[in-house]
Amino acid sequence: MQNICDGDAVMEESGRKIDLEECTCSCISFMELPWEDVVFPYIFSCLPIQMLFRLRNVSRQCKEMIREYFRTSTYVNIVRVASRMTSEAFQILTKDRCRILYLNLRNAKDCISDDLMASLFRANNRLQKVDLSNCSTVSNASIHVMSMNCHNLTSLILRECHWLSVSGLNVISMNCRQLENVDLTACWNIDDEAVIVLIMCCKKLRFLSLAKIYGITDHSLEIVARECPCLNHLNVQGCWRISDDSIRLLAEYCKSLSALQIRECRDVTETSLSKLRARDVKIDVRPPISLYRGPRLGPPPKRLNVQI
């Protein structure tokens, strides 16, 4: 039985009296919430970078809170603001950070440089995933520092990094042997020999993109076929010097292959692709349309020959 007396503001339940004032929760401010247990994982992690920088300007305590959040966060992703971020803002975002595991700087230009990236890579040697796609203001110098310090990298995306050289890729191959995901799309300076070094050093590769690298030939693809037993996805779109010879080897040796992107490879025909299709490998080129689809239920239709 429950009884509430307005006059005395007393709740009586099961013979026990409780003052309602004791049941009223006192209000706590946002700044009093536990930072690392509540604010950082459940609030700040959902806010865009722009909002975090605005909050940083509210008060000294907010500035300190944001600084601590940046310092302890393991994730950096500036994709949505890459075109607007300044060098000063990037330094605020990355200053004193030593726990970064995932770094996505895709399309960043004016805000980063070799000096900034060198400091970042030296301080964060536990990096696992890095995306520098279309970052035109850095060079092989950044790649060298990254490779010498970040030996635990499992994913490296360098799409449209036209500045990447053969020596730069060789340094990556020899120092980052845990790589599983490598995207070198449109890294035009790369050749067969650099790809072979990568394949021989990084035995855990599951995804490899060599799309739009016009120096790639059957020579390197044959090594890929023989030395990458774990490879699941291969992208060689636009590599027009590849032929059926290397695709046959892929079908024979790459038993784990589940997807092949081969569009715009003019010398690759259905002769080699049919073997992969038989294994249900997903291919971005449609098979030729047969004249008769499905099983034939009777004799071929008679043709009428009319001569005038």
Image: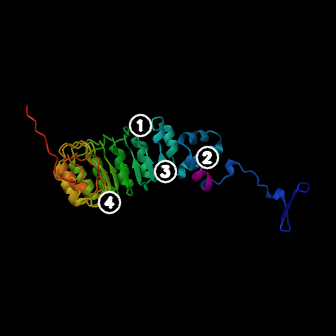
Depth check, front residue: 287 or 186: 287
As measured in the structure, the alpha-carbon distance from the residue carrying label 3 to the one carrying label 1 is 19 Å
What kind of residue is marked 4?
Lys
Q: Are the residues tagged 4 and 2 within 8 Å (C-beta)?
A: no
Give the label, 4 or 2, closer to the camera.
4
Looking at the rendered image, the quarter that the C terminus falls into is: top left
Depth check, front residue: 290 or 69: 290
How far across and how far down the image is residue 248, in percent? 18, 55
What kind of residue is marked 3?
Tyr
Q: Quadrant of residue 206?
A: bottom left
As measured in the structure, the alpha-carbon distance from the residue carrying label 4 to the one carrying label 2 is 42 Å
Badge 3 element: strand
How far across and how far down the image is residue 181, in percent? 35, 53
User: Image check: 242 left or right of 103?
Assistant: left
Please name the predominant secondary structure of the magenta segment in the image.
Answer: helix
User: Image check: 185 left or right of 115?
Assistant: left
Depth check, front residue: 175 or 105: 105
Query: Which residue matches tag 3?
Result: 75
The residue under the point 31% across, 44% down is: 185
What kind of residue is marked 2?
Glu
Residue span colored magenta: 37-42
As measured in the structure, the alpha-carbon distance from the residue carrying label 2 to the one carrying label 3 is 19 Å
What kind of residue is marked 1?
Lys
- Sooner in the amino-acid sequence: mark 2 or mark 3: 2
As measured in the structure, the alpha-carbon distance from the residue carrying label 4 to the one carrying label 1 is 31 Å
Query: Which residue matches tag 4?
Result: 204
Query: Which residue matches tag 2?
Result: 64
